[in-house]
């Protein structure tokens, strides 16, 4: 059975909105993923997120060491246009991306401005397994007290992200997707802190 480009992607969109409003809450899109059969060099969850959010009105930038050919496929399927990192509405990060490339992109990506804070980039990140444990602690709107989270991001990456979100309402929104059909969101309003290992 193939993906329904309207109904199934609407379900993914609602799941992303749910996760954005409840930062750190891990959601599953497995039932939709069972229909996915795209021949692409990234996990199906990241691809469905791309298919859901990108269209002809937005631009994107791809961070990948070995799969730059995916740029053409993304444009073909979504009609979105490729753009330099400092102009892209969406930044897509695949697992094979080096940490230094992520840190450089974090410094250069769109961060909005005080007049138009919404003119910032949203990151869609192919992650290792997402879990609610680990050293990262999340606090802020949509979180009752605090929430722990484990993603592919290193301490340096989270520190770079904190710098970009320091001056509210500026900042970037992060969407992580893993091989187990799980997604989790960390919006710009969420504060992150790396706990020390005892």
Image: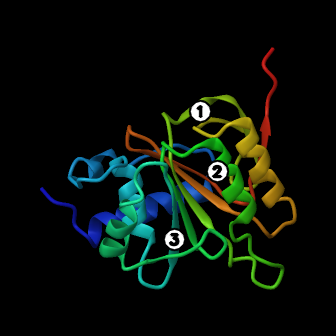
Q: Which residue is mark 1?
A: 132
Q: Which type of secondary structure does the marked residue at label 3 adopt?
A: strand
Q: Which residue is mark 3?
A: 60
Q: Residue at x 32, y 45 (%)?
A: 30
Dot 2: few (<14), some (14–19), or many (≥20) neighbours within 10 Å?
some
Asked which colour scheme the image uses, the reply is rainbow
Rendered location of residue 35, percent (x, y): 20, 52
The mark that comes first in sequence, 3 or 2, is 3
Frontmost of labels 2 and 1 is 2
Q: Residue at x 49, y 59 (%)?
A: 16
Q: In this rendering, would 46 be left or right of 155?
A: left
Q: In this rendering, would 187 be left or right of 73?
A: right
Q: Is residue 110 visible?
A: yes
Q: Which residue is mark 2?
A: 102
Frontmost of labels 1 and 3 is 3
Q: In this rendering, would 118 be left or right of 92?
A: right
Rendered location of residue 37, percent (x, y): 20, 52
């Amino acid at each position: 059975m193939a993906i329904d480009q309207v109904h199934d992607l609407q379900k993914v969109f609602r799941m992303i909105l749910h996760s954005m409003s409840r930062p750190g809450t891990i959601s599953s899109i497995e039932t939709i993923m069972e229909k996915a059969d795209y021949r692409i060099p990234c996990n199906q969850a990241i691809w469905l997120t791309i298919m859901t959010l990108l269209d002809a009105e937005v631009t994107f930038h791809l961070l990948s060491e070995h799969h730059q050919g995916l740029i053409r496929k993304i444009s073909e399927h979504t009609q979105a246009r490729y753009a330099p990192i400092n102009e892209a509405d969406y930044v897509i990060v695949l697992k094979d991306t080096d940490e230094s490339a992520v840190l450089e992109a974090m410094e250069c990506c769109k961060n909005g401005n005080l007049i138009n804070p919404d003119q910032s980039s949203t990151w869609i990140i192919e992650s290792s397994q997402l879990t609610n444990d680990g050293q990262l602690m999340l606090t802020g709107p949509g979180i009752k007290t605090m929430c722990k989270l484990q993603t592919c991001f290193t301490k340096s990456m989270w520190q770079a992200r904190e710098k970009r979100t320091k001056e509210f309402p500026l900042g970037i929104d992060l969407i992580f997707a893993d091989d187990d059909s799980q997604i989790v969101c960390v919006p710009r309003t969420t504060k992150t802190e790396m706990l020390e290992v005892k």
